[in-house]
Image (spheres, coloured by chain):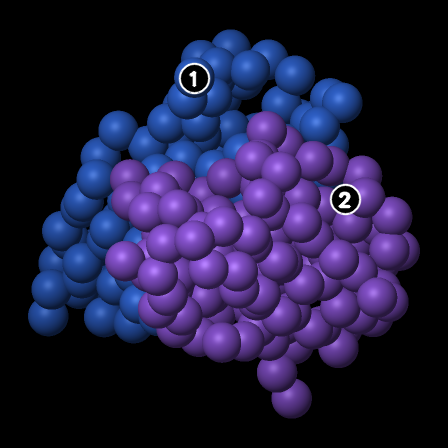
Amino acid sequence: DTAVSQTPKYLVTQMGNDKSIKCEQNLGHDTMYWYKQDSKKFLKIMFSYNNKELIINETVPNRFSPKSPDKAHLNLHINSLELGDSAVYFCASSHPYSPLHFGNGTRLTVT
Amino acid sequence: DQQVKQNSPSLSVQEGRISILNCDYTNSMFDYFLWYKKYPAEGPTFLISISSIKDKNEDGRFTVFLNKSAKHLSLHIVPSQPGDSAVYFCAASGGQGAQKLVFGQGTRLTINP
């Protein structure tokens, strides 16, 4: 009965590779998000989608491309991975103007 | 540009006592504030929120206080229990970025038996 699930939980890859993180929510929420928690532990928003439409796109390199095939899914594809991309990536969902429900995170390590 | 700051990286409290976690913000457009709790290897979970039209919101052992003039909010947990040991994040949103939560860097709370 997981509400927001993201896979994989851990991802170790080499610089230059392309990888994807998948996210699914079964809460019926219209809005989904990607947040990044960096080495200093700050959680910062990257993207937000409402009903498959991109509504927030923070200053994120073009190498990061979110894709929402339907309102229950928001995947994150990262091209040409760099060392600085190492972080924990959290997917979240919510009804508009309501608290976010987060997944358990994907720890990405780029070597 | 840290708009939400939690100046105490860690806090240690005796079981049964009150835990007080603090948060300051700089953006006067923020009108909705939340606290999240995070256990290791899990995502943050919503704890309690407050809108700027209130100065206090209570839910069981958790109370959030908002002082708009000081741009300060605090989370009180009483009595503190061992299961409360976690990292607590303060978050805020409002204005044009109403759907964009800005988080503080978290405070690690340890409840000692």
Residue shown at 75% from the left, 68% from the top = A73
Of residues A97 and A71, which is closer to you in this image?
A: A71
Residue B14 in view of the camera: yes
Which color was chain B given? blue
Q: Amino acid at mark 1?
A: Asp
Vertical comparison of A71 with A42: above or below: below
Q: Which chain is purple?
A: A
The residue singled out by tag 2 in the image is: A97
Q: Position of residue A104 (x, y in %)?
A: 48, 69
Q: Is there any visible trace of residue A90 in the rendered image? A: no
Q: Chain of mark 1?
A: B
Q: Position of residue B26 (x, y in %)?
A: 48, 15
Residue B49, percent from left and from top:
59, 45
Same subunit, tags 2 and 1: no
Chain under disc 2: A
Q: Position of residue B25 (x, y in %)?
A: 46, 21
Residue at figure coordinates x 72%, y 46% from the top left: A48
Q: Secondary structure at mark 2?
A: loop
Q: Say which residue appears at 53% left-offset and 64% top-offset.
A: A19
Nearer-the-camera pick, B26 or B65: B26
The quarter of the picture where the C terminus of chain B appears is bottom left
Q: Is residue B66 left or right of residue B87?
A: right
Q: Which mark is residue B1?
A: 1
Is B74 on the left-hand or right-hand side of B53?
Answer: left
Neighbours of disc 1 within 10 Å: few (<14), some (14-19), many (20+): few
| Residue B2: quadrant of the picture | top left
